[in-house]
Image (cartoon, rainbow, N blue to C red):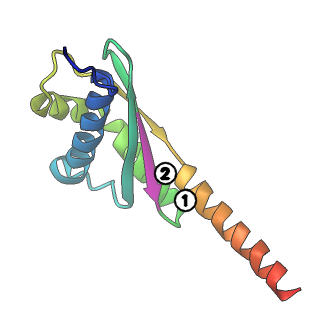
């Protein structure tokens, strides 16, 4: 009897896409406009692998640099897809759509807020 995996093929591919897209952006493309630290948080591809949303988080205190870095990454979508096709063993490589994900910054902001509330309660 064959054991079925709880992780689907699509989930495995999404994880592989995530890792490879980060490698491509950070090491192979060397776009001078990508000046800030970034992370590929996750990739959600369609079942037929025709398109994929790539969630990017950019870490910067300067909003203009953050936006410029994200825009540079998004503008390189076709180059990234081309490089991805070289390393992924799949019949099709999805069209990449980049989404700026601010959830990490939001979480950090909420942590600071909770800490300030907690410190205020300790003083009382």
Residue 67: which numbered mark, if any?
A: 2
Q: Nearer the viewer, residue 7 or 67?
A: 7
Mark 2–mark 1 CB contact (< 8 Å): yes
* Residue at position x 18%, y 53% in the image: 27
Q: Nearer the viewer, residue 75 or 82?
A: 82
Range covered by the magenta-colored residues: 54-59
Furthest residue to the front? Answer: 1
**Left or right: where 107 falls relative to 90:** right
Furthest residue to the bottom? Answer: 123
Mark 2: few/some/many CA within 10 Å (<14, 14-19, 20+) = some
Work out how far the residue at label 2 is from the one at label 1, CA to CA, in angstroms: 6 Å
> Residue 18, image x and y in percent?
30, 40
* Residue at position x 80%, y 84% in the image: 122
> Residue 79, image x and y in percent?
22, 34
- Residue 38, picture quadrant: bottom left
* Residue at position x 36%, y 14% in the image: 47
- Residue 3, picture quadrant: top left
Secondary structure found at label 2: helix
Main secondary structure of the magenta stretch: strand
The residue carrying mark 1 is 63
Secondary structure found at label 1: helix
């Amino acid at each position: 009897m064959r054991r079925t995996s709880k992780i689907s093929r699509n989930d495995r591919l999404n994880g592989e896409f995530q890792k490879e897209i980060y490698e491509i952006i950070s090491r192979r493309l060397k776009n001078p406009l990508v000046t800030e630290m970034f992370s590929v948080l996750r990739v959600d591809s369609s079942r037929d692998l025709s398109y994929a949303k790539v969630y990017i988080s950019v870490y910067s205190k300067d909003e203009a640099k953050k936006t410029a870095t994200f825009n540079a990454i998004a503008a390189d979508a076709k180059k990234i897809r081309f490089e991805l096709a070289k390393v992924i063993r799949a019949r099709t490589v999805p069209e990449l759509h980049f989404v700026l994900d601010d959830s990490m910054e939001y979480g950090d902001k909420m942590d600071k807020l909770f800490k300030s509330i907690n410190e205020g309660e300790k003083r009382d």
